[in-house]
Amino acid sequence: MDFYAPVARAFIGPLWAAWERSPYLRHFRELKDREYEAAPVAQKKQWDVLRGMIRHAFDEVPYYQSVWTGAGIDPERIQDWNDFESIPVLTKADIRAHGPELIARGYDRRDLRRKATSGSTGVSLEVWVDEPSMQFKRACTLLADERSGWRFGEPVAMIWGNPEYLKRGWRGRLRNTLLERARYLDTLKMDEETMARFAAELTRRPPSLIFGHAHSVYLFAEFVHSRGLGPIRPRGVITSAMILHDWQRQAIEGTFACKVTNRYGCEEVSLIASECERHEGLHVNGDGVYVELIRDGRPVGPGEPGSVVVTDLTNRAMPIIRYQVGDVASWADHPCSCGRGMPLLERVEGREADFVSTIHGELISGISLTENFAMLVPGIAQLQIIQEEFDRFTFRIVKGDDFGPESLSRIAELVAQRFGQESKFDCEFVGMIPQEPSGKYRFCISKLPNAFSDHKISVVSIQ
Ligand SMILES: [Zn+2]
């Protein structure tokens, strides 16, 4: 029995928030009160907030003033969601090129929180977030995370790179001891020894939640399972920051005997969508963001993959309006049975750059492609597919026990089937799939532009 958790929840949390002068627990209670609000009511509120943000952006942000005026957009004439779609999309390139012009007048960067992503080009992208928005985002994330079964104040096992609290000195350490109660398996130092030690620790003192990058949690689950360690029995597992494959979900749920709650977000706007306790899709975090899915400039229907375009509803310091995140997702064709009104994503398909475009003009989701190959080719422990050119592929393979000549001929067969008879491939055998600098893994990388990534949906950019 964890007697400390209710104390942390009822006393330490509120005291610490008061000391930090943070309203996030108040936001959290308000969000919880209207979690099941009917969709039309929630949408009306969302629209009002969005209108306010559009006006603010046009009045106070030089970038939007210039681009929208150039595109003939009059914010006063944006009366409904259709009008809203006429606003030009904001790309990563736009943010890189015009960062300072995206900061609203009256805000000083020294008072803002810097969020940086490394990005596939290696050039980092900076977004600046004001403190009220940060605290609101924190509440949205807490609300979503509690749907995993974990409760605020209970201990957490983090499978993550760079423990955040260590950067905050003694305050960070104290806060972690008293409130966050997180123990870390550093994903940048994941090996047999660190995993064995972590497993022993979690067996001795069980966490209520295991949280981490999908693939890293999967690797840890496989390790615990294959060595017969544990049992480790958390109430929930949350995976974040990258694609969760169905086979990974099954393996994780098998090892830890609980459900996986998948969460989707990005550094620039924080939480975008998250599963609820029913696991029928990912609910959009409609209090924090407005989400569109677009292909060739038009909204896609349920089940069709579309590029994720997100509008941040709270960050007034650097308004992020119709931002093309670089990921692809699809809408569910049914509401979730839990009764929450916010729109439901069926799945996050991957990054735009994870989609393979074939010689025949087909666009294949890299996620399903990798799953498919891994399932049909015998002896593959892990796989990364890289599209070098339209008709040339590299397979990075971690061999399993039964990898043999028949595995290679099976790959050749599948390459011809999926990518065309003309296509060629090379195999590279590796000990493990290399991580990105961020600690994430990518299973399919296309070096070619495609219908999502060629910025057809970006109608205007300023010179
Ligand atoms: Zn639901």
Image (cartoon, helix red, strand yellow):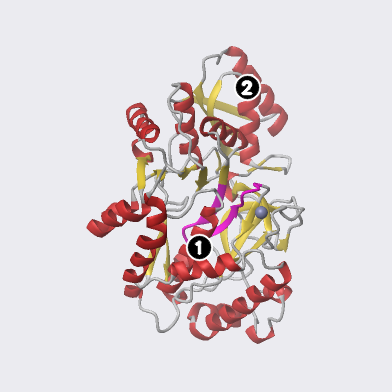
In this view of the protein, can residue 85 be seen by the observer?
A: no
Element marked by disc 2: loop
Which residue shows up at 59% across the image and 28% down it?
Answer: 425
For label 2, the residue is 377
> Residue type at mark 2?
Val
Residue 45 found in image quarter: bottom right
Q: Quadrant of ligand 1?
A: bottom right
Give the residues in magenta. 262-279
33 to the left or right of 136: right
Vertical position of residue 355 compared to residue 296: above or below: above
Is 363 drawn above or below residue 428 in the view shown?
below
Q: Residue 382: percent from the left, percent from the top?
A: 52, 28
Along the viewing direction, whichever of 336 and 309 lies nearer the viewer? 336
Q: Nearer the viewer, residue 61 or 72?
A: 61
Residue 49 horizontal/vertical position (percent) = 60, 77
Return the residue nearer the eye: 298 or 173: 173
197 displayed left or right of 79: left
Q: In percent of the image, x 40 and y 32: which residue is there?
A: 203
Q: Amino acid at mark 1?
A: Ala
Q: Looking at this view, is 190 or 404 the one in front?
A: 190
Label annotation for residue 23: none
Instruction: Report x, y in % for residue 181.
Output: 36, 49
Q: Is residue 358 magenta?
A: no
Tell me the distance, in whole angstroms, between the alpha carbons under discs 1 and 2: 39 Å
SS label for mark 1? helix
Magenta stretch: helix, strand or loop mostly: strand
User: Badge 1: few (under 14), some or many (20 or more) residues near its Cα, within 10 Å?
Assistant: few
The disc, 1 or 2, on the residue closer to the chain's N-terminal end is 1
From the viewer's perspective, is 326 left or right of 199? right
**Rendered position, 411 above or below 330:** above
Quadrant that contains the N terminus: top left
Label 1 sits on residue = 93
